[in-house]
Amino acid sequence: MQSPGSTRALEDNSNKKTKLIDFVENTSNKNNLQNTLCDSHRKFLVLYANADSLHNKINELKLIISSFQYKPSLIAITEVKHKNKWQTSLSELTLSGYDLYSNDLDSSSRGIIVYVSKNIKSKQMYSNNTALEHLILEMEIN
């Protein structure tokens, strides 16, 4: 036996479904539809890893990202460089769909890379503080 509240919930869900179907049938641009439906379920996902040399793990990182249902908005990698040598170009570390930001990888530090989804407006900021290895980004999240 259903309580009056559960019947009302079923009616409300049915009404939402009807509204969604009407919206789909009356929408001419499928991309706008997908964006509209996904907006209420947007998430800001962050992936962090300490790579201890990203160059030899970049394919593993790409595989991990491709396994996610939702792609991370931001991927932060520390200890990008190998302990003893660094002979890698940043172009070898790019990820499709992401802007790449890094601290000074030519210095003696181990390095930081942050990948930001191209869907997010972002830019790198700089400070004169050299006491701590860091990377500062400004992002506009809607």
Image (cartoon, helix red, strand yellow):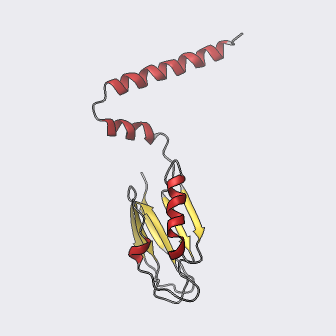
- Please tell me which residue lies in front, 131 or 15: 15
Residue at the extreme right: 1
Q: Which residue is painted at 37% across and 22% down in the image? A: 22
Quadrant for the N terminus, please: top right
Q: At x 53% / y 90%, what residue is drawn?
A: 108
Snapshot quadrant of residue 5: top right
Seen in the picture, residue 46 relative to 100 is either above or below; the reply is above
User: How far across and down, in percent of the image, does residue 6 sit?
Assistant: 64, 17
Q: Position of residue 98 (x, y in %)?
A: 41, 62
Q: Is residue 132 left or right of residue 114?
A: right
Residue 64 in percent (x, y) is at 55, 59
**Number of callouts:** 0
* 1 w.r.t. 107: above or below: above
Q: Residue furthest left?
A: 28
Residue, x 53% and y 21% (percent of image)? Answer: 13
Q: Position of residue 124 (x, y in %)?
A: 41, 72
Residue at position x 44%, y 63% from top?
Answer: 116
Picture quadrant where residue 88 is located: bottom left
Q: Is residue 127 left or right of residue 49?
A: left
Q: Nearer the viewer, residue 39 or 50?
A: 50
